[in-house]
Image: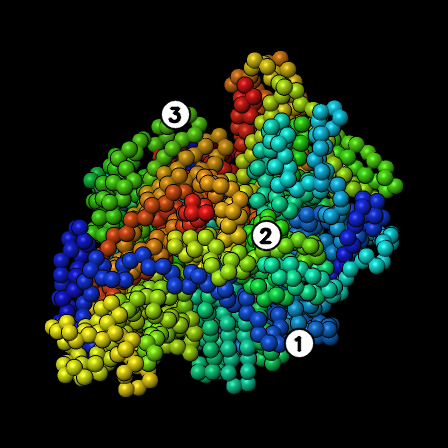
Amino acid sequence: MDKDPNQSPPKSGRNDDQNKGKLSRRGFLKGMGLTTAGTMAVSSGVLAFEKAEVEEDKVLGPDEVRIKMKVNGHAYHLEVTPRTTLANALRDHLELTGTKVVCDRGACSACTVWLDGKPINSCLTLALDVGDKEVTTVEGISKAQELHPVQQAFIDHDAAQCGYCTPGMIMSAAWIVENVPNPTLEEVKNALRGNLCRCGTYPHVFKATMEAAKKG
Amino acid sequence: MKKKKLTLPHGIPGHNLSQIDREVHIDEPPAWPINDKLQHVGKRVKRNDAEAKVTGNAKYTSDMQLPGMLIGRMLRSPYPHAKIRSVNTEKAENYPGVYAIHVFSRAFGMAQPADNDKENQFPEIKYAGQPIAGVAARDAETAEEALKLIEIDYETFPFVVTVEDALKPEAPLVFTTNVEQEDKGGGGGGAKGLKTQGNLRGPNTASFYGGPRGDLEKGFSEADVVLENTYRTQVHTHCPLETHGVVVDWKPDFVTIYASSQNTTSVRNEFAEVFDLPMSKVRVITEYMGGGFGAKHALGNFGVMAGHLSKKSGRPVKLMLDRKEEHISAGNRPNSIHVLKVGAKKDGKLTALQQKSHGTAGVGLGAGVGRIAQAMYECPNFSTEQYDVFTHAGPGAAWRAPGNVQGAFALEQLMDELAEKLDIDPLDLRDVIDKSEIRKVERLRGAEKFDWKRRNKPGSDKGPVKKGIGMAQSHWPRITGINASVEVRAFRDGAVEVRSAVQDIGTGTKTILAQVVAEELGLKPEDITIRIGDTLFPDAPGSGGSQVTGSITPPARNAAYKLKMQLLEQVAEGWELEAEELDVADQKIFAKNDPSKSIAFKEALGNMRTGQLLTSASRSDDYGGFMVGKSISYGELGSVQFAEVTVDTETGYVKVDRIVAVHSCGRPLNITQLESQINGGVIQGISYALYEYRVMDKNTGHQMNANLDMYKVPFAFEVPEIETVLVEEYSARSSTDAFGIGEPANIATAAAVANAVYNATGVRFYEAPITPKRVLEALNNL
Amino acid sequence: MNKFSWYQASSVEEALKAVNSTVSESLTAKPGTGAVFKSGGIDVLDLMKEGLLQPEMIVNIREIPGLDSIEDTADGGLKIGANATLAEMMENEKIKQNYQALYQSLNHAATPQLRNMASLGGNLAQRTRCWYFRSIDHQCFRKGGSTCFAKNGMNEFHSILKNGMCSSVHSSSISTALMAFDAKVEITGSKGKQRLVDLDDFFILPGDDPSRENILRSDELIAAVILPKISSDTKSIYKKQGARESYDWALADVAIVADVKSGKCSKATMALGAAAPVPLRIQYAADMLVNEKIDENIAKEVAEAAMERATPLEHNAYKVPLFKALIKRSVLQLA
């Protein structure tokens, strides 16, 4: 059953023969079929679209648009463009830099904020998507100078190493503590399962969240 | 040198604790007893910057916003191997919102021809993603739009991205002459002066443990058993949550750099060198940084670019890499193809150990399998040949125990195989071949906690879902940086401040400094203000090699001790006593023999003759001297880890259920933080064993999984139950006798997991990571 | 992301007027042209951040009233509005109770954060996660190019069935479950024209048109997904294996919906995800269960049959035993 470890490269599947033929004919490749970054769409731009039928006064942008956004209990007036993400609006416009952007694609949950109380990825939410909804960030979950129980538990159980994932972790953990009574460890892991920590602080994060849930 | 004699604790409490006398410099503070008898050191002191982190108030480099600040972005080659015929930046320069453009005339952050430091018009492109030019603009979107307007005429060439292909005779060459890569403050680089032939550089045969030893042929001929196997590990990328990046604020007379760095001092030095500035005119600040794991020692090409853009625009420029750039260009752990051969007697004694390895750090140096095979076990006949193989891929960088994680994956599996062949329990085999006292104790304590004796024969679990257990050991030297200095200041109002350029990479350096200084001054850790991560303060080593704790805490203690003695002298004068007759405890200064004479520490500071007391200290030589040069201390950071896994032989999925990690780091300073760090090393080790690997497309030369979606790193459900056991070990080598844990935490895990997978399935996996694909291929003969 | 303008649609009719391009069409069009829909925005923003999609305008359908309702149909089935989020679907009692395979597929999909944002319609319409497709530097069949890079490249996450032209896999694991339930997609066209199509017919293979993954035209919008009524004997099983457990795309996923009484099956459907460029119904294999007692033998036979047409590539032959294992276990769980 064991594979011969000395065989190089590892065994391959059924397409290997065709593959080899091509490789040896062409020798080392120069990157065939590659397009130069950013030019792909231009080179293949063949379609032309009909003009969209819109009520012109309902079109916002592409330049700056003035919006009102409720964040952590305050209403802010912001000038954003349609492409401004919620994460950028928070970080660059409101200087609420607790919210971190890590993967920028919804794959790590570092940018987690609450929208009307539900955890979402602020990197994949546009500022214009927010509308009348209430945004809560890590800066907004402590009440009247008191740390949120999850924040205190994170301190008590050393649940932050480099600290960069921490705001996102806190927002996921605080959500379950506030919304699920007496969560099991499994439920806690489930609530945190989208949050990446590269320092590997998870065991202490679980502990802290369980502790905060118990107290809450 | 004036000397005195100190009697210090020596040995392992509960095992062989005794005392030892050392001749030390007259200025050294008295010996600390073991942790049991200390107030703050060795305790579960809360991390002193935790509140800033949990509230979002901690400001990282990526959070910086300075007045007038621009955003820098870089243009990168889509081709893995090309010459640049021309670069036209005219359209980009005229794009509204663009303030500066710079085109590289030299490549940074990769191996370079040894004799060639002269500027070319454009450096050759050697990997897809190599930066070519940069733009500073009012915002990131504008910068990116401007980058698209830069016109580059490339002449493309064949390329090679795998070790196997790079070694073929007709392979395209990455370098055509001998190359070198300097170690930037512990951040990688390679052995000097080795020859390059084709894409092969080396072999590297020596280390600070010396070169080959004994007579291999004789050793193998004396052996009762000879085993040889080839082990493979993958390239993986660091994925710090905060990407590499800087903010450079170039003022005519002074440059300030905010850097997401694990080495403020080396970033300053490199910036000063590249821009021909005195070191006194460059300031590097790293107050908070979002992870590094070895990849963030150097200034980086992005740092050089930001420097040029800030200089040209006259404004601060922030240049943070995006996630894709981080994967493809900011470092990785090189892979390894590691042939390891061992000869042993029937009783387990090793007679010969021979290793040969090939690995690629892309266009950089630093592949290898470390020194673990050379150092961990007693074996009279040993040789190693470690080769770098160049490929057209992003440069490698140091990563937690460079080389040794690759090396342990092979060595500790081979020892497992040897034990089975000789029908000896793997722990018993180690008792025969491992002379380390600390690992002996670790094996004992770990085996008990883990319940090792329940181990069954390989593959003996019935049914498709099988459990297995395994163990592995690690060795890491005690690296010490003597360029480690600390200032302690006390103010008239009672405030005490510690200052050093040393950075906190997330390990808790700020907290241990407060503990050590508080212990010395009889204060509370929370009373000590820690100001670090700023090169305006005294130099300190990078957070690499597990050297920070051992390097920076002795001078911190010594500076605090000096300050204490200065204050005690002033107090003693008033009491008509000698300073030596006074002591500190519980925020008070008191006369040892007269309880009526006592004053609050704060009050004593209020009475002092100047507004401020200021002392500093640099790392003294180890008590009893160093093992190697002024950089390697005697002793080692040994560890033993045990793993329990479940293997679903039908889906191929391996899950780690439990890890027991038994570690030593001299005198442990902060138990909770050490546990956090060990958890992290273990989880990264599990990921290395089971999940993550860089996918390079051999046909186009691109990394296909340069994101956090297809690059598989562990999340909540991939994390097992981890139990840590810390074994205190006193060796009387410095005023704190403490060492780090970062590297050892990461070395043994992958091998322990692989051994457990073998124990579960009866099938050995010679290649990491052990994914469902690999398991199913092996079990189904695909 | 490129500069674009924003149009907040308040009705389906208004949205259909404002939009003039599918995401797929816009992908191969001149940058800065085309008005495309966005609901949760997960996939649209991802494509835009990669520089693959550069529309002139985003038509936001997220706030259209009523498009997110989940309601019973007249014949006892369930109609799920296209704007319902995955989280909202998980909260629906009927889905939890009656459509367990769907619930399980939701439970294994994405992260809690993404499920609070992602809409059902967007999940069906998302483009493949094939890493060559997602790379701005690789112009493959699906983006108007003339090659499939995966075919002779790095294809361990790619398809083992129907992979002749393009070997991507469709990424919606929820569709695997929906297909096994014989779900239908309600599509609204301009002037309120509606059509109802089987989910099987909603997806199209690359051979038919590599640039698209579904039949949607630029003047159409997914309005809802309709699940037929299930019987009291209906059992549904969903199993997924990813490279990780916490959250990941499927290496393989399987849904089986069957009527089983006293251990004997009277009717069954089966769909596989991450096996082909579309979620794939393997009816001939499911049919083997009919009138059979559920046991190890029939489970193995069905699994073997389902994989007999597999044509794995260089790096993904492991998917064949993986699918077999998941199918076998799913069948056994019907008993």
Q: Distance between the residues labelled 3 and 1?
A: 69 Å
Q: Where is residue B514 in the image (x, y as percent from the top left)?
A: 33, 67
Residue most toward the left?
B593
Q: Name the disc covering residue B99, or none.
A: 1
The amino acid at mark 1 is Tyr
The amino acid at mark 2 is Trp
Q: How many marks?
A: 3
Callout 1: SS: strand
In the rendered structure, which disc, 3 or 1, sits on the residue that comes first in sequence? 1
Q: Name the residue under label 3.
A: B462
Name the residue: 50% across, 53% down.
A170
Camera-near label (1 vs 2) is 2
Chain label for disc 1: B
Name the residue: 39% across, 46% down.
B750
Callout 3: SS: loop
Relative depth, front residue between A149 and C315: A149
Whether marks 1 and 2 lie on the same chain: no
Q: Is residue B3 visible?
A: no
Relative depth, front residue between B38 and B462: B38
Chain label for disc 2: A
Q: Name the disc covering residue A114, or none.
A: 2
Camera-near label (2 vs 3) is 2
- Side of B252 where B627 appears, left or right: left
- Side of B55 where C89 appears, left or right: right
B417 is higher (above) or lower (below) than A141: above
Q: Name the disc covering residue B227, or none.
A: none
Name the residue: 29% across, 75% down.
B602
The amino acid at mark 3 is Lys
Asked if marks 1 and 2 touch (Cβ < 8 Å), the reply is no
Q: Position of residue C40 (x, y in %)?
A: 68, 47
Q: How would you rate the neighbour count of disc 1 (Cα within 10 Å): few for under 14, some for 14-19, many for 20 or more?
A: many
